[in-house]
Image (tube, helix red, strand yellow):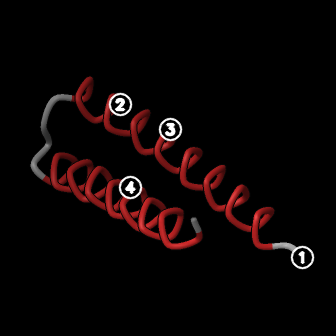
Amino acid sequence: MHTFFSFLLGLMLLAVLGVLAAGMIGMVREGDPRRSNRLMRWRVLLQALALLLFAAMMSLMRP
């Protein structure tokens, strides 16, 4: 179970990194501000999910 949560947490963190990179590239290229806002919302949502998953993982590891 611990391995599954670790793998899932790694995927969530990579997703956050991907969305963050896409947002930064779009900002540098001066793209559509609506797309930038949508990416920001996705980043915040993915970060929240990653934190919740991390908290669940830590609570399951407690003796």
- Residue named by callout 1: 63
Secondary element at tag 1: loop
Real-space Cα distance between discs 3 and 2? 12 Å
Nearer the N terminus, badge 3 or badge 2? Answer: 2
Query: Gap in Å between the C-alphas at discs 4 and 1?
Result: 30 Å
Q: Residue at x 10, y 49 (%)?
A: 29
Instruction: Give the quarter of the image for residue 35.
Output: top left
Name the residue carrying label 4. Answer: 16
**SS assignment at label 3:** helix
Residue type at tag 2: Asn
Label 2 vs 1, first from the N-terminus? 2
Q: Position of residue 11 (x, y in %)?
A: 36, 61
The answer to which of marks 4 and 1 sits earlier in the sequence is 4
Q: Which residue is mark 2?
A: 37
Q: Return the residue at label 3.
A: 45
Q: Position of residue 21 (x, y in %)?
A: 25, 59
- Quick check: marks 3 and 2 in contact, CB under 8 Å? no
